[in-house]
Amino acid sequence: MNNNTKEELDARRKEFVIQQKKLMIKFILFLLVVISVILMYQLLSYNKESKKQEIKSLDQQSQEINQEIGELAVSSEITNKSTNEIQIQILNGIKKQIPQTIDQLTVIRDAEFLDNVLTFKIEIDDRKLSKEDLNKFNSSKLNTLLLKNKPIACSLMKNISNWDDLWKIKYSYYLLQSQTEVGHATFNKGECS
C-alpha cells in the first residue's frame, strides 16, 4: 500500500469518525429536546412537590443518557452501515431510555423498527381511571396526546442525521389491563414544516 492510499484511508477514517461524533451530538441534542418537552408537560400536570421530584428524576435520566451517548460516540468507528444496522443503532439508543414515564397515566414501554416504521408503544394505566373517565380519556385526551406527538416525531426525524426520508414514526397507545390498542398516529418527515 503506497503512502497516498494510506493517507487517503486515514483521512476518510478521520472524516467518518468526525461524522459519527456529530451524529451522536445531534442525537444527544434530540434527547435533550425530548426530555425538555416531557419536563414541560409534567410541570403543567403535577402539583409543586411532584414537580420537584420529577425534575430531579429527569435531570438524572438526562445525565445518564448523555453519558451513554458519549460512550457510543467514542466507540463508533464502523464504516458503511446498512439501513438495518442504522435502524438498530437508532433503536438501541432509544431503548436505553425505556421505560420512560410521560405522566401519571402514560409510560413509553417499548420501541421497535418494523418495515421502516419506528413504533413507540405507550401504555395507559387504565387501573387509575373509572369507566367514565376512561371514555373521556379515549375521546378527548388521547386525541390531544396524538396531536402533541407530531412536533416530537418531527424533531426526532430532523435531528438524526442518518434518518431516511422514507422512514416513519408511529405512536401506539395501549391499555395496561387489556393490552388493546386505543389509538395511534404515524408521522413522516414530509409532514414536518
Image: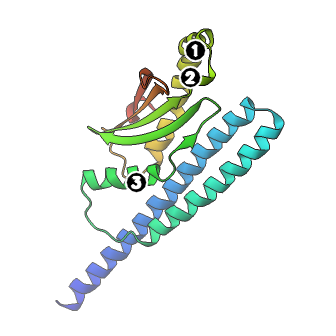
**Quarter holding residue 81:** bottom left
Question: Viewer-nearest of labels 1 and 3?
Answer: 1
Instruction: Mark 3: give few (<14), some (14-19) or many (20+) Cα within 10 Å.
Output: few
**Residue 33, position in %: x, y?**
59, 46
Give the mark nearer the N terminus: 1 vs 3: 3
Q: What element carries label 3?
A: helix
In the image, what residue occupies the spot 46% across and 62% down? 22
Instruction: Mark 2: give few (<14), some (14-19) or many (20+) Cα within 10 Å.
Output: some
In the image, what residue occupies the spot 40% across and 54% down? 92
Q: In this view, does 144 lie above or below 158?
A: above
Label 3 sits on residue: 92
In the rendered structure, are the residues bearing label 1 and label 3 in contact, judged by CB atoms less than 8 Å apart? no
Label 2 sits on residue: 126
Q: Which residue lies furthest to the left in this view?
A: 1
Residue 53 horizontal side relative to residue 22, left or right: right
Viewer can see residue 165: no
Q: Is mark 2 on a helix, strand or loop?
A: helix
In the image, what residue type sits under mark 2? Asp
Give the mark nearer the N terminus: 2 vs 3: 3
Label 2, label 1: how far apart the Cα atoms are: 7 Å
Label 2, label 3: how far apart the Cα atoms are: 29 Å
Viewer can see residue 108: yes
Question: Viewer-nearest of labels 2 and 3?
Answer: 2
Q: Is residue 2 above or below residue 83?
A: below
In the rendered structure, are the residues bearing label 2 and label 1 in contact, judged by CB atoms less than 8 Å apart? yes
Label 1 sits on residue: 134
